[in-house]
Image (spheres, coloured by chain):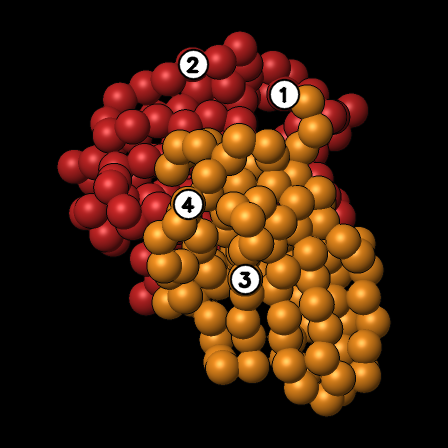
Amino acid sequence: QKEVEQDPGPLSVPEGAIVSLNCTYSNSAFQYFMWYRQYSRKGPELLMYTYSSGNKEDGRFTAQVDKSSKYISLFIRDSQPSDSATYLCAMSGAGTASKLTFGTGTRLQVTL
Amino acid sequence: GAGVSQSPSNKVTEKGKDVELRCDPISGHTALYWYRQSLGQGLEFLIYFQGNSAPDKSGLPSDRFSAERTGGSVSTLTIQRTQQEDSAVYLCASSRQIYEQYFGPGTRLTVT
């Protein structure tokens, strides 16, 4: 079983919809939780990070972490065609364990 | 400011040849990471450099893979005697903090 599980999609939604992207994980040592967006043939771009449990909002994006359930989410409000990309969750422990463990990514398509 | 840069952007090589991939991190970032992304797979950690500390090589898949970082800045990932299974996108990232890794555009390696 992988440390981080993420539904690969593809997920297709109409423009303006609320999108929910999720990851589950098994390693309780994870403390930092990140979401990256990756356009085709580009490197991943950091969207948001959250430390430990809780919510964080940035514009149309909201990240949630529920450590008790080992479940993280990214919500995108008022989705736009430009949001069409692959979304990767990533996690790391605190301290010296600085490598990121990634999910496989969810491909999102926002249609007009 | 300038982001992480990688060269070459694409590399086609014959099986058995050696290749060198280069990464220029963001100025002032003390940590540098190499990841590999294969089709349908998530990002796989390869190696991590932090300042003058010994690198974390725990993700290197075989002794054909090696990396060095000169002067705490530029890094080179070397793959010796390339195999077809080495075909992937090799991504470099740099950071000041664990949770803010910034990625370059990647080098797409194809082994024929």
Give me the C-alpha separation between circle 1 and circle 3: 42 Å
- Residue under disc 1 on the same chain as residue under disc 3: no
Q: Amino acid at mark 3?
A: Glu
Chain B representation colour:
orange
Number of the label disc, if any, that sits on residue A79: 1
At mark 1, the secondary structure is: loop
Give me the C-alpha separation between circle 1 and circle 4: 40 Å
Q: Amino acid at mark 1?
A: Ser
Number of the label disc, if any, that sits on residue B51: 4
At mark 4, the secondary structure is: loop
Tell which circle, 3 or 4, labels the residue nearer the N-terminal end: 4
Output the letter for the chain in red: A
Q: Is residue B98 above or below residue A80?
A: below
Q: Say which chain tag 3 marks.
A: B
Q: Residues within 10 Å of mark 1 (few under 14, many from 20)?
A: many
Q: Are the residues flagged by discs 1 and 4 in contact, CB closer than 8 Å?
A: no
Q: Disc 2 designates what residue?
A: A57
Q: Disc 3 designates what residue?
A: B68
The x, y position of residue B103, in whole percent, is 60, 41
Quadrant (top left, top right, bottom left, bottom right) of the N terminus of chain B: top right
